[in-house]
Amino acid sequence: MDPEQMFGQFDRLLEEERGAIRRLDGARVHDIAAEKADLFLAIRESTRGRTELAPRFRELAAGLRRNAVLLAHARDCLRDVLSAFHDGSPATPYAPAPSSAGLSVRG
């Protein structure tokens, strides 16, 4: 598979991941994460030194950020639901979630 095909596959995985997040399909989100990790390693190996692909990497980063935001929002919603279930009151709706080490939403 050439790099552009790999980028296309990664885009399809991101789209499928967004759908899985919306459907609350945690098992599929987990499976896609493993697929993305493997595919990213293959992309990285096949594109070393190919600076002309920098715009494509920026697009990929933007898609990853979009999905990370969806996942963070889903996590916060779950935290609020669990909090309401356990003590009868939801967590503060606009309280910032604890930051996750290793997750960066900056480009």
Image (spheres, rainbow, N blue to C red):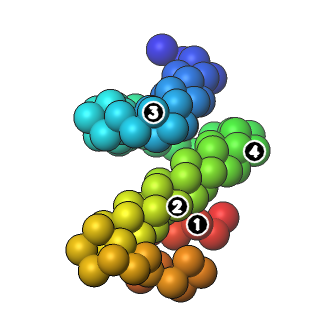
Tell which tag, 1 or 3, sits nearer the viewer.
Answer: 3
Q: Which residue is mark 1?
A: 105
Q: Return the residue nearer the eye: 33 or 87.
A: 87
Residue 84 in percent (x, y) is at: 35, 72
- For image coordinates 35% across by 34% down, the residue present is 25
> Which residue, as the protein is rendered here, is positioned at the far top?
1
Instruction: Check whether the beta carbons of the residues at disc 1 and disc 4 lie within 8 A of each other.
Output: no
Q: The disc labelled 4 sits on which kind of residue?
A: Pro
Q: Which residue is mark 3?
A: 23
> Is residue 46 shown above or below 85?
above
Q: What is the quadrant of the C terminus in the image?
A: bottom right
- For image coordinates 52% across by 43% down, the residue present is 48
Q: CA distance from mark 4 to mark 3?
A: 31 Å
> Residue 100 appears in which quarter of the rendering?
bottom left
Is residue 46 visible to the viewer in this orientation of the structure? no
Is residue 24 visible to the viewer in this orientation of the structure? yes
Q: CA distance from mark 2 to mark 1?
A: 13 Å
SS for dot 2: helix
Residue 22 in percent (x, y) is at: 51, 38
Q: The disc labelled 2 sits on which kind of residue?
A: His
Q: The disc labelled 1 sits on which kind of residue?
A: Val
Of the two numbered discs 4 and 2 on the same chain, state the one appearing first in sequence.
Answer: 4
Q: Which residue is mark 4?
A: 55
